[in-house]
Image (cartoon, helix red, strand yellow):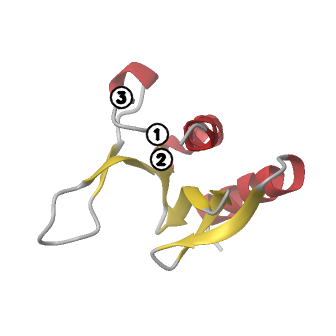
């Protein structure tokens, strides 16, 4: 298990253990976090993805590795979903908080 995966598991345990309505789930076969049956964060290959909305600006947040989720070869990226590399994993927990807050309002 990598350091990034251990960190995701710690974040997942914290959210599911302390936040009512947050459960484990899947996003495209990857482990994730759900609120009211909606995934708001997930882990995949040394990255985490977050549902932050179209208005989120990664640069203003100080992120250098963030990019839009683009899982399909022949379709555009998924707006409002951002992928953050393990190099910036210190941001994962606050981003998960922001993603949860955003998802609660949907």
Residue at the far front: name it: 106
- For image coordinates 11% across by 71% down, the residue present is 74
Mark 1 neighbour density, 10 Å: few (under 14) some (14–19) many (20 or more): many
Q: Residue at x 62, y 36 (%)?
A: 101
Left or right: where 8 falls relative to 58 = right
Q: Residue 27 location in percent, x, y?
A: 50, 70
User: In x, y percent, where is residue 29?
Assistant: 50, 80
Task: Give residue 96's position: percent from left, percent from top.
Answer: 61, 43
Whole-percent x, y for residue 67 in the image: 30, 46
Identify which residue, 44 or 55, lies in the foreground: 55
Residue at 23%, 55% in the rendered image:
77
Q: Which residue is mark 1?
A: 52
Q: Residues within 10 Å of mark 3 (few under 14, many from 20)?
A: few
In the image, is 29 to the left or to the right of 21? left
Task: Give the secondary structure at mark 1.
Answer: loop
Say above or below: 43 vs 53: below
Q: In the drawing, what numbered circle is on residue 35?
A: none
The label shown at residue 55 is 3
Pointer 1 with pointer 2, Cβ within 8 A: yes
Res 100 quadrant in image: top right
Dots 3, 1 in contact, CB < 8 A? no
Q: Calculate the distance from the C-alpha at mark 3 to the C-alpha at mark 2.
A: 11 Å
Label 1 to label 2: alpha-carbon separation: 4 Å
Give SS at disc 3: loop
Q: Residue at x 39, y 49 (%)?
A: 81
> In the rendered image, which quarter contains the N terminus?
bottom right
Q: Which residue is mark 2?
A: 51
Does residue 54 sit above or below 67 in this rendering?
Answer: above
């Amino acid at each position: 298990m990598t350091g990034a995966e251990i960190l995701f598991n710690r974040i997942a345990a914290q959210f599911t253990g302390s936040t009512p309505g947050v459960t484990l789930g899947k996003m495209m076969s990857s482990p994730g976090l759900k609120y009211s049956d909606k995934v708001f964060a997930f882990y995949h290959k040394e990255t985490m993805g977050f549902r932050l909305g179209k208005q989120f600006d990664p640069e203003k947040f100080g992120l250098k590795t963030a990019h839009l989720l683009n899982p399909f070869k022949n379709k555009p990226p998924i707006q409002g979903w951002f992928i953050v590399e393990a190099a910036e994993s210190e941001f994962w927990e606050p981003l998960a908080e922001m993603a949860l807050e955003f998802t609660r309002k949907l």
